Image (cartoon, grey):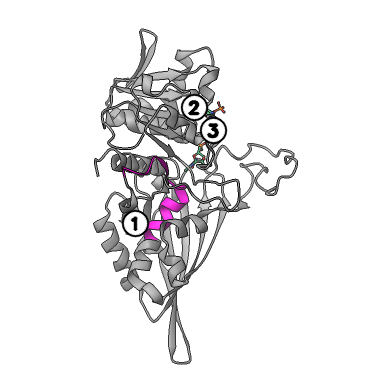
Amino acid sequence: MSGVINPKAPVGVCGIGRIGKLLVWYLAARGEHDQIVVSTGRKTGKGIDDLATYLGYDSTYGSFSRFVGGFRGGRAFEVRDGSLYLNGVKIVWLAEKEHRVPGNIPWSDNGVEVVFDTTGKMTDPTINDDNALRGHLNHAKRAVLSAPFKIKAKGTPLPEDAITLVGGVNFDRYDAAKHTVISNASCTTNCCAPPIKALVDHFGEKFISYSLTTVHAATNSQNVLDVLPKDGEKDTRKVRSTFNSMIPTSTGAANAVIEVIPEIRKLGIGSQASSMRVPTTTGSIVILDISLMGEFDDDYVNDIFKKYSAKNPDIMQYSTEQLVSADIIGSTHSAVYDSRFTHRRTSKRGDHYFTMVDLNFWYDNEFGYVSSLGRLYDLVTGRR
Ligand SMILES: NC(=O)c1ccc[n+]([C@@H]2O[C@H](COP(=O)([O-])OP(=O)(O)OC[C@H]3O[C@@H](n4cnc5c(N)ncnc54)[C@H](OP(=O)(O)O)[C@@H]3O)[C@@H](O)[C@H]2O)c1
């Protein structure tokens, strides 16, 4: 089911963990829909009142009421006639066991056209199965994944109707008549791809290589305390206690960036990415080290991001403040460029100058990412 999407149709959200819950907050706060349909595929606590408490309060962002109305606002969530309302938007809750399987979820019966899958469990767009991402298309027009695609069968190409889209980078590749399965990539890719795109467009062949490290807040894929690694587990560091360590781990951001900026491969720009998990609840930073052919000073480099953020004000914020990660919580931008923390050094080999620049981009890996899903939703519904 391709074609035009009704922007007023209820939105579907499958899975209401960190990303799904905050997406519900975001959509309810926008107040453009009468209903949001959430599928948990299971009951929670003692029922609707416990769902209300879960969706009404958040350990990281405070209460939904304050999120919507500030300190002077009234209570913005209530259970009325057996249904939960957030900011007056009815939350239709699909909690039966059969709803655990995407292909069984009655999205269209509830008027839903676009579904966000935020479970993190169904990431392969090549599998034609009710119990896979594509299963959502049994009863919806679009399935949007809040994660990078992961194709299990090596060498299987991405299907024609699937695409990875990142705001500020390749939204122009979206074809409403063709694309029905869409990945919004990862939070890290949403942060680093826009500045890398700006650099590729600006420097072209003078851009030799980049290496990025994301210093990333904890997520629910980690463990509160140490656990015994599963049989065959490759990344045994990731099962260590979130509280006690900085935990080096891998990220798929390098490949994902090439997927959305194919010029990187064409120009032969070298790239590398890694990740360090740290014990904060949200708020992350991409440290992007780039090598350039030629001599460039800080002002020259800063100007590239000044122009990019002026052109893409919702994607990148240009900051001159001395920020720390706590300041980024609640940011709606995919990347906040920390211009005060840019370091550069130029060297000379023979007659050639080379400049290495250390660039830093903050991002709220949770709410910033949810905001990027919102921008993708605007694209899919023809609002942008
Ligand atoms: N957290 C971040 O910073 C971040 C940023 C960008 C992207 N992402 C990506 O977004 C995805 C979700 O991440 P998250 O941090 O939100 O994870 P999370 O907090 O673990 O949430 C996942 C939720 O999905 C539910 N779920 C699993 N299978 C389901 C099914 N079949 N039907 C309905 N609900 C189901 C889980 O509930 P149960 O308890 O019922 O299983 C859980 O509530 C991952 O792919 C992640 O990589 C995360």
Residue 140 image-quadrant placement: top left
Q: Is residue 20 above or below residue 233?
A: above
- Callout 1 amino acid: Glu
User: CB at mark 1 closer than 8 A to ligand 1?
Assistant: no
The span from disc 1 to disc 2 (Cα, nearest Å) is 48 Å
- Callout 3 amino acid: Asp
Indicate which disc, 3 or 2, sits on the residue closer to the N terminus: 2
* Residues rendered magenta in the picture: 176-195
Q: Residues within 10 Å of mark 2 (few under 14, many from 20)?
A: many
Q: Residues within 10 Å of mark 3 (few under 14, many from 20)?
A: some
Seen at 41% across and 26% down, the residue is 139
Q: Residues within 10 Å of mark 1 (few under 14, many from 20)?
A: few
Q: Secondary structure at mark 2?
A: helix
Seen at 51% across and 51% down, the residue is 157
| 316 part of magenta stretch | no
What residue would you read off at disc 3? 129
Label 3–label 2 contact, CB within 8 A: yes
Q: Picture coordinates of residue 236 (x, y %)?
A: 70, 47
Indicate which disc, 3 or 1, sits on the residue closer to the N terminus: 3
> Residue 321: which disc?
1
What residue would you read off at disc 2? 103
